Each structure stands twice: as C-alpha cells, then as structure tokens.
Image: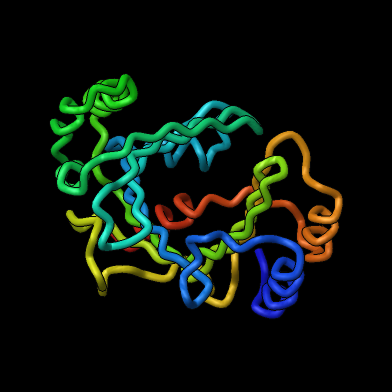
Amino acid sequence: MLTGTQRLRFESQLDALLHQDPHNGADGNYLVRSLYFDTPGNRDFQEKADGVELRKKLRLRIYSTEAATVLLEMKQKQGNNQFKRSLLMKREDAEQLAEGNFAPLLDYKEDFAAECYALINRDLYLPGTIVEYQRKAYVLPENDIRITLDSQIRAAECCGSLFFERSPGLYPVMDPWKTILEVKYNHFLLSYVRDIIRSCNQSELSLSKYCMARKLTLTLN
C-alpha cells in the first residue's frame, strides 16, 4: 500500500526505467471493472478471508464501458501459485450473466465455458459484488514483468448491468489517496526493478480488492 507521496516518488522511478502499458489513457490510467460471482453463503469470499490453501474467484471483467466483449475469468490459487483462465464473451451474453441468466454459456464451444456453466449450476453461483478502480500499469518484456498501481477503489452490490457510466451506488473501499501496488513476473525479478520496489520501504501484504469490497457491501447490507 502506497501513500500519495510514496506513489509520486515511485512513479518517477518507473517512468524512467520501464515502459508504460499501452492501455494507459491520456490521464495515465484506465478503468478496471469486475463483477464477482459467489455462492449464496459467500464461500469463495470466506475461503479467501480464512486463508484456505486452494481457492478460486469467478468474475466478469471490462476495461471500458463501451467494450463490445467481456472476459469471464476464473482465478485459482494454491499457496503462492496462481492460475487464471478466461473466456471472451459477447457484450450481450455477459449482460445476461450479470442478471443471473447463465444459459448463454451453452453457446460457446470452449471447454472452459462448459466447466463454468456446470460449476455455477452445481454451487448456485449468483452475481455478487461490482468492484472498479483506476489502474496505471508498467511493463517489461523480460520475464513478463508487470507492475500495477490501483487506486480509487469503489464497490457496490451488483445492479444488473456491468456497463453503467455512473452509479451513485458505488462506495469507496479505502482512502482514495492510497494505492495498491502489485508486481507480477515469471521466473525472477530483475535486480534493478527489485531495488525500486524495495525503495518503497513497504512490507509485502496479501491484499484482495474483492475481499475488501465484499466486506464493505456485506456491512452496508
């Protein structure tokens, strides 16, 4: 977690040494909005909160309210190992999923679509929490290094649509001036990038934007 001052110093170092993600917009950020599904007893949320070794999250994700396609993603994690699979869906089909109608998954030939349909019907998954934030990303081709800065995190219970322009139902999840820093890479992190990360003088924490958001929405309800 970075303060506003720490972020400014950190960004200046990244600007000098890494490439900005081409998706960064004119203001240096881009929208990330996700709709998370969960069981009636919030099993996936509870397993994450309890630190269960083997767990998963199922979500729809967009990067623009004008997007013609949507990603259905399943993130599975066991300890430090993480595996993510995705299905590219038509906008209108994703809207049906957001309203609790999962039949459009049957129209996709990918095995992952059939797996999601079976899981959703077996465990009675329902649309749960919408989480959105502004992201700035930096990349390096070596070892697929990717550093993201996520801020202005807001959340609400699912309102039936994933593509709304503005919604008064979104509540701040944390201090809007603070930023969540995430670093992803394959094999190993280059030494000069590791030195930049260490300069933040921040302890490594396991933070889940979904868990923070879900705690908020459960409290509000």
21 relative to 200 in the view: left or right: left
Q: Tell me residue 132's x, y (percent).
A: 39, 61
Q: Tell how many labels.
A: 0
Which of these two is toward me, 185 or 221? 185
Q: Residue 202 appears in which quarter of the rendering?
A: bottom right
Q: Quadrant of the C terminus?
A: bottom left
Which of these two is toward me, 169 or 196? 196
What residue is shown at x 49% (from left), y 77% (from top)? 27
104 relative to 48 in the view: left or right: left
Can residue 218 be seen from the camera position used here?
Answer: no
Q: Tell me residue 4's x, y (percent).
A: 65, 78
Q: Quadrant of the N terminus?
A: bottom right
Q: Residue 45 appears in which quarter of the rendering?
A: top left
Q: Tell me residue 208's x, y (percent).
A: 53, 50
From the viewer's perspective, is residue 210 above or below residue 165? above
What residue is shown at x 78% (from left), y 39% (from top)? 188
Q: Residue 177 appears in which quarter of the rendering?
A: bottom right
Which of these two is toward me, 135 or 58? 135
What residue is shown at x 26% (from left), y 34% (from top)? 125
204 relative to 72 in the view: left or right: right
Which of these two is toward me, 107 or 131? 107
128 relative to 152 in the view: left or right: left
What residue is shown at x 28% (from left), y 62% (from top)? 65
Can residue 76 be seen from the camera position used here?
Answer: yes
Q: Tell me residue 98's x, y (percent).
A: 21, 47
